[in-house]
Amino acid sequence: MLVDKNQPIKKMKLHPRNRNREKYNLSALVEVVPELTNYIVPNKAGEDSVDFSNPKAIRLLNQAIFHYYYDVKKWKFPVENLCPPIPGRADYIHYIADTLSESNFGKIPVGRNIKILDIGVGASCIYPLIGTTEYKWSFIASDISQQSIDSSKQIAGKNPSIEDKIEFRLQNSPNNIFKGILRQTEKIEAVICNPPFHPSSKEAEKVTRRKVKNLTGNRVNEIDLAGIHDELICDGGEYKFIKNMVKESEKISRKCLWFSSLVSKQSNLKAIQKLLQNTRVKRVKIIPMGTGNKSTRIIAWTYLSKEDQKNWRETRWKK
Ligand SMILES: C[S@@+](CC[C@H](N)C(=O)[O-])C[C@H]1O[C@@H](n2cnc3c(N)ncnc32)[C@H](O)[C@@H]1O
């Protein structure tokens, strides 16, 4: 196994191609989603900002960002579902694009021939929306929740330019990742995944309270913990989820160019690397990411040698 050594140790800035790198044009955002005006408050420095302690404000801000910066005009899903912040999700997509470019002489492969599997698309369809918009890729989007699939499907249906680029597939068993999702002869360029990361709802609540306190300076006892339910919680937390993923990935090692997952807890990283060491993996990459005061990372792995990657490029991308 080869672990890249010449990667940056810490990268607190967003990816250079991330549209969220610059300070937001708040007045433009308010113009596309006027309701956002009701949630503008002064931040610690006394400047106009969005009330990040309020889930409704965050949701409206993200709607506005999608509309103004990505031309995704319809992005609505049930309030009880997790509202993902766009900047970090966009970073993941850009780093996967960079990773794929390594098998293509540094050029990012674009277009619908490039198929990405999003494990756990959620109700917001966030990764497929960004990936189709940025690189015109096509997506297979899985989830164990029929409601989440329906919600994401509805979002895709309301945005005609992306609708035919996303295919939704229900995972019938929470213990399976690829089994039952990928078809016999199907190949995919990459797997992306933001796994449910908390092992219990108690821990999920604790982390959310800490997040709000960091953002606002206020201690929070009672809060509408939007997104705190099965979306964030799975038995064994993210470690067990990724462990299953690694195990299953070996069985379909030649069907996918790069497997990957977010690893939210730094403390899980070593154990995951160790799991990979015991497989036939050819290369592992750890990609650090950071937004604001949160740092996270992607772990990506491939079972394909340089020669296999060359064959992949020549058979799938030269059309
Ligand atoms: C943290 S949420 C991520 C949602 C969305 N991708 C995002 O980044 O905001 C994890 C998602 O994984 C789904 N999930 C849990 N187990 C799964 C499995 N075995 N296969 C596919 N999806 C699963 C959950 O239902 C949930 O929607």
Image (cartoon, grey):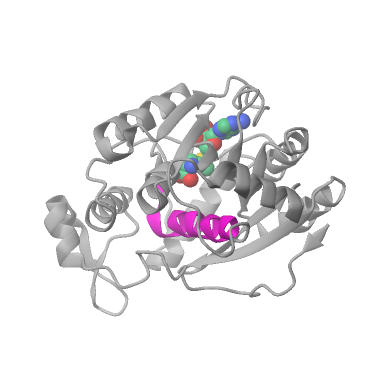
Q: Residue furthest top?
A: 172
> In the rendered structure, which segment of residues is drawn in magenta?
84-101
Vertical side of 20 occupied by 228: above or below? above
Q: Does residue 250 appear to the left or right of 165 in the view shown?
A: right
Q: Can residue 264 be seen?
A: yes
155 and 136: which one is in front? 136
Rendered image quadrant of residue 247: top right
**Residue 25 in magenta?**
no
Vertical side of 85 occupied by 240: above or below? above
Residue at left 29%, top 72%? 43
Residue at left 67%, top 34%? 235
Vertical side of 115 occupied by 208: above or below? below
42 and 110: which one is in front? 110
188 and 95: which one is in front? 188
**Residue 86 in magenta?**
yes
Residue 88 placed where, x, y %? 46, 58
Vertical side of 78 occupied by 207: above or below? below
Q: Main secondary structure of the magenta part?
A: helix
Marker count (numbered) = 0
Q: Does residue 183 appear to the left or right of 150 in the view shown?
A: right
Residue at left 77%, top 38%? 250
Q: Can residue 194 be seen?
A: no
Residue at left 55%, top 55%? 96
Rendered image quadrant of residue 48: bottom left
Q: Does residue 41 appear to the left or right of 174 in the view shown?
A: left
Residue 13 placed where, x, y %? 48, 73
Q: Residue furthest bottom?
A: 45
Screen quadrant of the N terminus? bottom right
Residue 288 placed where, x, y %? 60, 66
184 and 294: which one is in front? 184
Residue 15 placed where, x, y %? 47, 68
